[in-house]
Image (tube, helix red, strand yellow):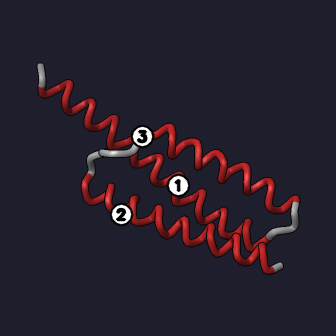
Amino acid sequence: MTPDLINGTFEVLGGLAIGLSVHALHRAKVVRGVSWPHVAFFTSWGLWNLWFYPSLDQWFSFAGGVFLVAINAIWLGQILYYTRKERKWSSSSSV
């Protein structure tokens, strides 16, 4: 149980750390220094963990993983949204 608790804590702390990026991107509304494939990869890995942890009976890890995947998915959505918005703006202003 202790390794599960430790891993679950890391999952939650990872979600909080990514939450800082979500907040920063929300304020800046411009994507710089990160690309969506990297975030998509780690989001998909997190989704895998949501299947994997219960198969190992690791419920703290699962709970932390739900939080981490949710925050990563929000960040990925923001990245795609603001990148698309910037491309639309730059293409319409160059006409």
Residue 13 at what x, y percent from top left? Answer: 55, 71
Which amino acid type is shown beneath numbered disc 2? His
Give left or right: position of 54 versus 18: right
Give neighbour class at mark 1: few <14, some 14-19, many 20+ (Cα, 10 Å).
many
Task: Look at the image and tell me in which quarter the N terminus lies.
Answer: bottom right
Up the image or down, 17 lies above or below 31; here it is: below
Q: In the rendered image, which quarter is residue 33 located in?
A: top left
Up the image or down, 71 lies above or below 10; here it is: above
Disc 1: which residue:
72
Residue 9 at what x, y percent from top left? Answer: 64, 75
Q: Could you give the CA–CA distance between mark 1 and mark 3, rounded to whole angstroms?
A: 13 Å
Residue furthest to the bottom: 2
Disc 2: which residue:
23
Which amino acid type is shown beneath numbered disc 3? Ser
Q: Could you give the CA–CA distance between mark 2 and mark 3, rounded to whole angstroms?
A: 17 Å
Disc 3: which residue:
35
Give left or right: position of 19 versus 9: left
Q: Are marks 1 and 2 in contact (CB under 8 Å)?
A: no
Q: Secondary structure at mark 3?
A: loop
